[in-house]
């Protein structure tokens, strides 16, 4: 039952279904759900809503508690600050983090927690490195995700495309999304791995408008330092990579605005 | 305990750890693990290996049973055969399937089951549409995944690249992988969304050789029809898209060689 609920988040599962699946009486299912509810709460796994009555059942809504979120962000900030991540040109290597199932799982839980009480139909991201984040968030929200691409691909069918100005390089770029992949009026959550000038996120916003869909929010794994006006300001970031000193070979990373946005707390300031 | 084990597959968790985490005696943890072992087995969730003694513990190895695998493949074949998936040029739209958490979860379980008894250090795929499959398989195997790309990206650092001949178009293409992302001697499982001529998989094979790593196996979600010699023959496919008739507006899909490779059975021939 635990496994079934964990694998079907945000879905109302009826007592009848569990009763038939496990060959048990509804009363003992009810009792087990009560135990599970307390366990999920005690361990910070999520909320198990139980609805009474003949049409009742249980719905599991995963979340992460403030303490666990703080611990995770602190750990990631520590890992990102490792100077062996420095790349030529002052870039920071992050790909390994976003390829680890344990990191992706927590990133997914964090972002799903932020949008706990909001209706989301689709998670959207831009190829390539945002995809694993989108998939993880989509798993916790139990909705599909869509991938916006910079290049056309014949197996996507007809697409809708927009031009946008890259915030960092000021170049004009193009992004496109398969027509079939997004419904009109859909509530869209945008996630990405990295944001600097916000040009990509701004492009995504126009693309969402082209589909007559609704932007619920934008959350990125990391934001980089940017001198100038960002093209978007209503975003959330898990971490900030503040300054890379190529001469000193050091990286200054810190917590992003996630904790204050979601829990109203700053790191180390509970 | 169920959740912890499900989230840490292929990892030996000691009785001591569970005892401290849940404040219970080792004997009652042992008893609970015994119940969980039977439940996992009865429901086809996976094997729960329990190791006795002071250094003992439990290791959860997820798998899928033949019946559930057959059911899933049959369902996917049905969905793929839907003629609304036909695209201009005789291509078939599959992106929506590989964006649904429920489909990706089962694809991950199927592929992880195939390599149940093999040592795998990394799952490898090619951008873009193989990524969600790689992530799902990597989650079940509890290993990181790496993404091979056709274009350089400054945040990847130094890369190793190979040229390869695309099996379908006979063009020469280039693929590359960040040096940091793969260790020498690593055991690599390759997954992808679609295979036609096998050129991409052949290119990946040379790339793995360049890293002095070891190819464990190659599994794709779908193989397409190909007239001519495939460049690879040692691959597994979940489904086959056999013939697309643009005049008739029909798609002929069927089960791939997965079931016979893994379970020694063909669909409908138990």
Image: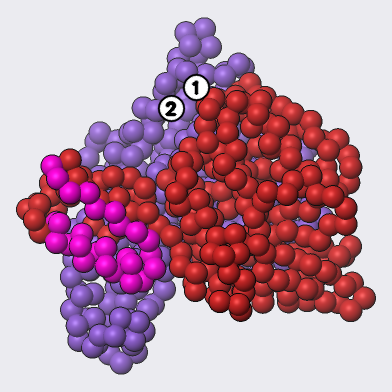
Chain colours: A red, B purple
Residues in magenta? A29-54
Q: Is residue A34 visible?
A: yes
Q: Position of residue A267 (x, y in %)?
A: 62, 74
Q: Is residue B262 visible?
A: no
> Is B79 or A264 nearer to us in this picture?
A264
How many residues crowd mark 1 within 10 Å: few (<14), some (14–19), many (20+)? Answer: many
Q: Is residue B21 above or below residue B61?
A: below
Label 2 belongs to which residue? B80
Q: Secondary structure at mark 1?
A: helix
Q: Is residue B191 above or below residue A147?
A: below
> Reading the chain from its start, which is encountered first: label 1 or label 2?
2
User: Which numbered circle lies on residue B85?
Assistant: 1
Q: Chain of mark 2?
A: B
Q: Position of residue A80 (x, y in %)?
A: 70, 71
User: Which numbered circle lies on residue B128?
Assistant: none
x 33%, y 39%: residue = B72
Residue A45 painted magenta? yes
x 78%, y 37%: residue = B172
Q: Secondary structure at mark 2?
A: helix
> Is A51 or A15 nearer to us in this picture?
A51
Outermost residue on the right side: it is A247
Q: Chain of mark 1?
A: B
Separation of marks 1 and 2 at Cα, in angstroms: 7 Å
> Is B140 or A102 nearer to us in this picture?
A102
């Amino acid at each position: 039952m635990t496994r079934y609920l964990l694998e079907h988040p945000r879905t109302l599962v009826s007592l009848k279904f569990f009763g038939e699946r496990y060959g048990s009486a509804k009363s003992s299912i009810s009792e087990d759900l009560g135990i599970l509810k307390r366990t999920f709460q005690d361990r910070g796994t999520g909320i198990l809503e139980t609805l009474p009555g003949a049409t009742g059942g249980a719905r599991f809504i995963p979340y992460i508690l403030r303490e666990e979120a703080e611990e995770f962000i602190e750990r990631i900030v520590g890992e990102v600050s490792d100077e062996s991540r420095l790349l030529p040109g002052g870039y920071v290597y992050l790909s390994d983090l976003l390829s680890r199932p344990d990191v992706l799982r927590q990133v997914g839980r964090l972002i799903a927690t932020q949008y706990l009480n909001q209706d989301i139909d689709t998670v959207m991201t831009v190829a390539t490195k945002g995809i694993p984040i989108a998939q993880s968030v989509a798993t916790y929200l139990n909705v599909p995700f869509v991938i916006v691409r910079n290049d056309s691909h014949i197996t996507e069918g007809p697409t809708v495309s927009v031009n946008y100005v890259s915030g960092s390089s000021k170049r004009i770029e193009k992004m496109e999304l398969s027509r079939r992949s997004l419904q009109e009026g859909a509530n869209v959550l945008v996630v990405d791995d990295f944001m600097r000038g916000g040009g990509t996120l701004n492009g995504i916003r126009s693309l969402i408008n082209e589909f007559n869909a609704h932007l619920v929010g934008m959350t990125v794994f990391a934001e980089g330092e940017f001198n100038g006006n960002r093209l978007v300001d209503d975003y959330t970031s898990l971490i900030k990579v503040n300054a890379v000193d190529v001469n000193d070979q050091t990286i200054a990373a810190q917590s992003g605005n996630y904790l204050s946005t979601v829990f109203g707390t700053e790191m180390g300031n509970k």
